[in-house]
Image: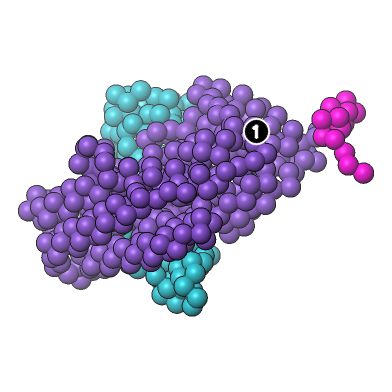
Chain colours: A cyan, B purple
Amino acid sequence: MKTNEVPQDKAFFEEGKIRDVCYAIDENGQYTKVLSLGWEPKNEAIKLSWDVVYKRVEEVRNEVMAGKLSPIAFYMELNVMDVSIVSAYTGIPKRKVRKHLKMKKFQELIPIVLQQYATTFNVTVDELKDLEKIQQFSIKI
Amino acid sequence: MQYDARVIVPQLRDWGYNILTLMKINFQHSMSAHCENGVTSNLLRFYGVNLSEPMVFGLGSGLFFSHMPFIKLNGMAVTSFRPWPGVIFKRVTRLLGIQYDRKKFANNKQMAIQELDRLLAQGTPVGMLVGVFNLSYFPKEYRFHFNAHNITAFGKEGDTYYISDPVMENVETLSTDELLRVRYAEGTYPPKGRMYYITKVPKDIDLNTAIVKSIQRTCKDMLTIPIHMFGVNGIRFLAKRVRKWPAKFGPKLAALNLSQVIRMLEEIGTGGAGFRFIYAAFLQECSVKLNQAWLNDLSKEMTDIGDKWREFAYLAARGYKGRDKQEISYDMLADLLLAIADREEKVFRQLRQIKL
């Protein structure tokens, strides 16, 4: 890859994103470091990963609105976590986390437990319980 | 007047000064493609050992390949273009006779912070393993549950740590809380507060011998591992799997699998083409240091191989790019991988001949 071939494909990411260091050959055939804004195959691969995540988030959101799954299930998907990761962060055993994914069990949870989930998902307890916020959630990507 | 920190620090503490509010180590932050290379290179430079990122990478025998269907990431096989995390730092320090200490604080976050502060106060910059999910200065789009990121702390002012993260252009900062969150991230291979720092650097370092040893090791890794998922045979193994993906997974999942390979090839800071360009830069540097021009020829061949990997990525991306995903030929992709494998094998067989 020559220095003038180093891609500068600005992606869908927010402005001021990371520029990557690439190694490329200058006019004298010497390797040098060049900053790259991005490369399309890589940008598209990351975008695809997030598309898959957000598709799942949409599905779970509908289940939450239908009263089947709980906000915990929603925020778990939103944070690209699974039951293992949520359990590790909250300290709550996996079998209990699985139960809390259902709306019925969620509504019985005490504040201390809700706070553990809220901290893990980087929200407040009020935000965690706020169904309207979940309904209004839109994906900016 | 030169102040000896070993005398001043306890003295100031006696007088009630929180020394950490005054202490910032004279550490030079430098940006690199890959975090482990960058932290290793930056730490070594602090102790007067000036090695570029390509040199660090080469000495650490960082060039590798593996395709492991038995390890899952995002539910799909893991493809890796470098060895296990931590191996580069370990190999470089061992080869050069540099001593270091490694600590883990699985259950004791308070100790993790205290030890870090103690080392910073005595003027020692500290490398740390962190997870990027809650890394506040990272763009959101990169914040997956990835736990093998390396950063260096080199100072503290009040509640703020000065962080040299090699993949960032400038010095960053983290509060104590934020630092703890990333040092104790959860997910696959949680860092558990792991940190490492250099303790002793020898006066003389025989770089040339180290270069030859490290190149021979890379050739061994790429050519002789008996399990076919690793090295050059691993590339052929991937080719075989890729050919079968459309039939095995259907078009959507096959494309997703491809995108995962491309992410490993380009996303984790490989400098382009799965570290092949960095290794070519290393060979170019070696040809000068060892005064062996043939290494420069192999550097050119490695660059061409890197370009082939990029070509592979371009073709693969047509399968998952945008809304109008094209029908791509997985046979063509597999054939391209086989051609790459052949060329890499040739390079490493030649490189293996290296002598001082």
**Depth check, front residue: B197 or B193:** B197
- Measured from the top left, where is residue A12 in percent x and y? 40, 67
- Measured from the top left, where is residue B111 in percent x and y? 61, 24
- Measured from the top left, where is residue A70 in percent x and y? 32, 38
At horizontal 46% and vertical 59% (from top left) the residue drawn is B292
What amino acid is labelled 1 in the image? Answer: Lys
Rendered position, B344 above or below B224: below
At horizontal 29% and vertical 29% (from top left) the residue drawn is A98
Magenta residue check for B130: no
At horizontal 51% and vertical 21% (from top left) the residue drawn is B107
Rendered position, B119 above or below B2: above
Question: Magenta part of the protein: which range?
Answer: B1-16
**Depth check, front residue: A132 or B60:** B60
Q: Residue tagged by mark 1?
A: B200
At horizontal 40% and vertical 33% (from top left) the residue drawn is B189
**Depth check, front residue: A25 or A51:** A25
Can see residue A88?
yes
Which quadrant does the N terminus of chain A fall into?
bottom left
Rendered position, B269 above or below B213: below
